[in-house]
Image (cartoon, rainbow, N blue to C red):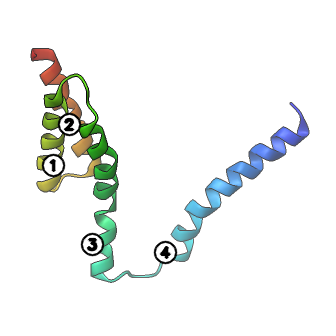
């Protein structure tokens, strides 16, 4: 492999690793206010909603597929599950729907 390609790969690794590592190191001892902790705790659900909602309205084949998936995700998120459980529950619900219908 060319020496320049190896240098580029190492450079890209550093560019992606440093922004992920710095907040962990810098803010390790900083205690965030409870309000900010609550806001940051809900960011994954907001991002998940921003990714899923447009997909619900653009389904061409079966509109119930989007409605059932969204309803399942909203209910499980409302009950307080983490993001992984929300996604997995929607996948299971839609798998069952596609299997039986």
**Eye-nearest disc, 3 or 1:** 1
Question: In the shown orientation, is residue 9 left or right of residue 44?
Answer: right
CB under 8 Å between callouts 3 and 1? no
Q: Is residue 33 above or below residue 10?
A: below
Tell me how far mark 1 sits from mark 4, CA to CA. 32 Å
Name the image quarter holding the N terminus.
top right
Mark 2, residue position: 90
Q: Are marks 3 and 2 in contact (CB under 8 Å)?
A: no
The residue that disc 1 covers is 74
Reading the chain from its start, which is encountered first: label 2 or label 4? 4
Tag count: 4
Q: Secondary structure at mark 3?
A: helix
Q: Residue furthest right?
A: 3
Q: Where residue 8 sits: x, y (%)?
A: 80, 45
- Which callout, 1 or 2, points at the residue further toward the start of the chain? 1
Tag 4 residue: 28
Coordinates of residue 68 in the picture (x, y in percent): 13, 35
- For the residues labelled 1 and 2, the Cα–Cα distance comes to 9 Å
Q: In this orientation, which residue lies closer to the viewer: 49 or 33?
A: 49
Q: Which-is-in-front pick, marks 1 and 4?
A: 1
In the rendered structure, which disc, 1 or 4, sits on the residue that comes first in sequence?
Answer: 4
Q: Say which label, 3 or 1, has the lower sequence index.
A: 3
For image coordinates 50% across by 76% down, the residue present is: 27
- Residue 94 is tagged as none
- Tell me if mark 2 has few (under 14), some (14-19) or many (20+) residues whose alpha carbon lies within 10 angstroms of its own: many
Q: Is residue 79 above or below residue 9?
A: below
Q: Residue 70: give x, y in percent of width and height.
A: 18, 41
Residue receiving disc 3:
38
Q: Describe residue 100's horizontal placement relative to residue 26 as left or right.
A: left
């Amino acid at each position: 492999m060319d020496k320049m390609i190896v240098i580029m790969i190492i450079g890209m690794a550093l560019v992606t690793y440093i922004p992920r590592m710095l907040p962990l190191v810098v803010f390790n001892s900083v205690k965030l206010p409870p309000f900010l902790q609550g806001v940051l705790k809900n960011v994954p659900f907001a991002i998940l909603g921003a990714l899923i909602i447009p997909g619900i309205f653009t389904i061409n084949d079966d509109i119930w597929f989007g409605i059932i998936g969204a309803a399942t995700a909203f209910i499980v998120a409302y009950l307080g599950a983490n993001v992984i459980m929300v996604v997995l529950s929607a996948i299971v619900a839609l798998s069952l729907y596609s299997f039986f219908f």
